[in-house]
């Protein structure tokens, strides 16, 4: 094979660049939506009511995404990535339209509107589960691992931009349009992505025997659902040792215990267990879990600190996250280019884990007197660490499996990160609440705990300004200390990332100099059997 840039097949880069705009739009669709909806939630509650069920608007989406992620990856492997990817866009758009219509006259008015929105958000999440997974898997289909770093770095940069733009767009929509446009804005983006990919995306289609492991999918779905409900309800809706939580734990253990022997027997398992025999795949799965645990669990509290303690508006708090997102975007692009140029990657997750741990430590030092610019510096350090990790773990996971399991590798990487984030949000939420009650009691006496339990977590800046100075200062001090404690606990999980990453074996990336044509096309590692010939284009 004639080498262009580190093993790139002639003409492949042009093909990828033609498809890339459609993939980027689909990624924006998934990332932008959740950030916009978060900003619009107060307005949604104001119209539909159901404040007690507010968290379920987010949880239903996360649950739908998490449950469907491994299924989307597997059926993409079986039936062709293009068809499945387009189907996930359609489902996402249908869910978006229904979310925008929740509580409208078509569904009988605002009565029951919150329940409708929660159900439609779950449907939207099912579609979103296929967007990120299959976007990354399509890059894997078109590009050998040696070249993937460049394009996955671009995708990571787009994800960062979407995370920055989300709160700003959401703030504008909330202030100037109906909250329903937080969902309707997905329609033009999704339609353009669908049409573009329908006519521009052409993937190699291999001969495979189409069998869906429905029993395994059902067991995995039940187990994941139980785990997500445990992390959502435990310590909040119900005590950890309540019959509800213990019952869910029993369901999770039984379903996942039965899932393992089922996956060993079926011809086409939804999550092939043999991929975990590869050390790199198992390690990157654990790193992804810890990354999600520390990152999503802790970052969830940054807007609360910025808006309540530092007095930023909802829209400005999105701007204040710019240093983190910009740092992550720049590093992701650098890492992608470096991997493409050198073919070496082991150092990046180790460096990323160390830098992320330093960022968490800096954020744990914050108090009520920390100025916004200093928080910006701290989160920029955190963003640097995330940039080294986000796409490198996906790349290593994909390089550890055969081409036929590429979708499984992509979905597993996303799946473990999502599960880790769900666990992190729950655990750090419990830590935050515990420290807040203790801090308010210490500063304000027994009535401090009553303030926390009576809605202190819902005090906005205007309500805080109306409090007597002594109570306000005590509340802000306790709040700042509680959030700092979250970042302190996150350090324990962040430091495990470089320790695990140090054991990753640097296997040469397929598609590099000296690899065969089959390997360049993205087959298994050295010595693995070649892939079947291409039968057609999807």
Image (cartoon, helix red, strand yellow):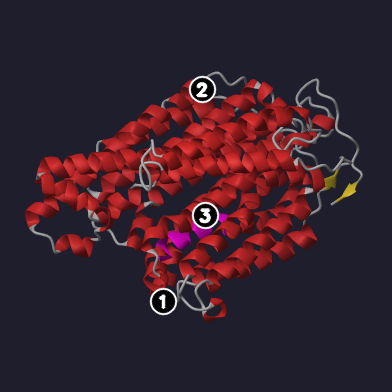
Foreground mark, 3 or 1, reads: 3
In this view, the residue farthest toward the front is 243
Q: Residue at x 84, y 52 (%)?
A: 538
In magenta stretch: residue 299: no
Specify which label sits upstream in the sequence, 3 or 1. Answer: 3
Determine the CA span between mark 3 and mark 1: 27 Å
Secondary structure at badge 1 equals: helix
Q: Is residue 87 above or below residue 261?
A: below
- Asked if one can make out residue 341 in the rendered structure from this viewpoint, the answer is no
Mark-to-mark CA distance, 3 and 2: 32 Å
Q: Which mark is residue 176?
A: 1
Q: Which residue is mark 2?
A: 500
Nearest to viewer (mark 3 / mark 2): 3
Q: Which residues are magenta?
A: 29-40
Report the residue marked by disc 3.
60
Point out residue 38 in the picture as x, y percentages from the top left corner.
Answer: 43, 59
What is the spatial separation of the Cα atoms under label 2 and label 1, in whole angstroms? 48 Å
Relative to 374, does residue 396 appear above or below in the rendering? above
- Residue 448 horizontal/vertical position (percent): 15, 48
Q: Residues within 10 Å of mark 3 (few under 14, many from 20)?
A: many
Q: Which of the pair 484/328 is nearer the observer?
A: 484
Instruction: Quadrant for residue 360, please give it.
Output: top left
Residue 20 in the image, given as x and y percentages of width and height? 68, 53
Q: Earlier in the sequence, mark 2 or mark 1?
A: 1
Give the residue at x 42% y 66%.
40
């Amino acid at each position: 094979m004639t080498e262009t840039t580190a093993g790139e097949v002639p003409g492949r880069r042009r093909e990828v660049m033609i498809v890339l705009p459609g993939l980027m739009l689909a990624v924006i669709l998934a990332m932008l939506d959740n950030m916009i909806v978060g900003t619009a939630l107060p307005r949604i509650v104001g119209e539909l009511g159901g404040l007690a069920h507010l968290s379920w608007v987010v949880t239903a989406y996360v649950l739908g995404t998490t449950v469907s992620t491994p299924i989307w990856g597997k059926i993409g492997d079986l039936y062709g990535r293009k068809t499945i990817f387009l189907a996930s866009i359609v489902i996402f758009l249908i869910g978006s339209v229904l979310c925008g219509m929740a509580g409208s006259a078509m569904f009988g008015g605002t009565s029951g509107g919150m329940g409708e929105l929660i159900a439609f958000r779950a449907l939207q999440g099912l579609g979103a589960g296929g967007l990120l997974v299959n976007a990354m898997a399509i890059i894997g289909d078109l590009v050998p691992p040696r070249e993937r770093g460049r394009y996955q770095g671009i995708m990571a940069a787009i994800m960062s931009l979407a995370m920055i733009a989300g709160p700003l767009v959401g703030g504008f929509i909330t202030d100037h349009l109906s909250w329903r446009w937080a969902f309707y804005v997905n329609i033009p983006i999704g339609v353009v992505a669908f049409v573009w990919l329908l006519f521009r995306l052409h993937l190699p289609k291999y001969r495979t025997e189409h069998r869906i492991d429905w029993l395994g999918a059902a067991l995995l779905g039940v187990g994941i659902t139980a785990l997500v409900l445990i992390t959502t309800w435990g310590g909040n809706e119900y005590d950890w040792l309540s019959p509800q939580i213990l019952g869910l734990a029993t369901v999770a253990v039984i379903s996942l215990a039965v899932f393992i022997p089922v996956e060993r027997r079926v011809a086409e398992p939804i999550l092939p267990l043999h991929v975990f025999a590869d050390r790199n795949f198992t390690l990157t799965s654990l790193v992804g879990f810890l990354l999600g645990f520390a990152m999503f669990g802790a970052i969830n509290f940054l807007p609360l600190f910025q808006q309540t303690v530092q007095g930023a508006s909802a829209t400005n708090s999105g701007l204040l996250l710019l240093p983190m997102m910009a740092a992550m975007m720049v590093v992701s692009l650098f890492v992608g280019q470096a991997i493409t140029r050198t073919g070496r990657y082991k150092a990046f997750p180790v460096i990323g884990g160390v830098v992320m741990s330093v960022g968490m430590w800096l954020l744990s030092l914050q108090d009520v007197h920390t100025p916004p610019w200093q928080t910006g510096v701290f989160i920029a350090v955190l963003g640097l660490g995330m940039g080294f990790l986000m796409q490198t773990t996906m790349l290593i996971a994909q390089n550890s499996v055969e081409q036929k399991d590429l979708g499984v590798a992509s979905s597993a990487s996303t799946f473990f990160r999502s599960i880790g984030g769900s666990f992190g949000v729950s655990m750090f939420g419990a830590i935050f609440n515990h420290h807040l009650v203790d801090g308010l009691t210490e500063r304000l006496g027994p009535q401090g705990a009553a303030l926390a339990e009576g809605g202190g977590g819902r005090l906005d800046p205007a309500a805080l300004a109306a409090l007597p100075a002594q109570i306000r200062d005590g509340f802000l001090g306790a709040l700042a200390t509680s959030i700092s404690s979250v970042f302190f606990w996150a350090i324990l999980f962040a430091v495990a990332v470089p320790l695990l990453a140090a054991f990753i074996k640097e296997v040469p990336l397929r598609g590099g100099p000296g690899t065969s044509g089959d390997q360049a096309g993205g087959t298994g590692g050295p010595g693995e059997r070649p892939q079947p010939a291409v039968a057609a284009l999807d």
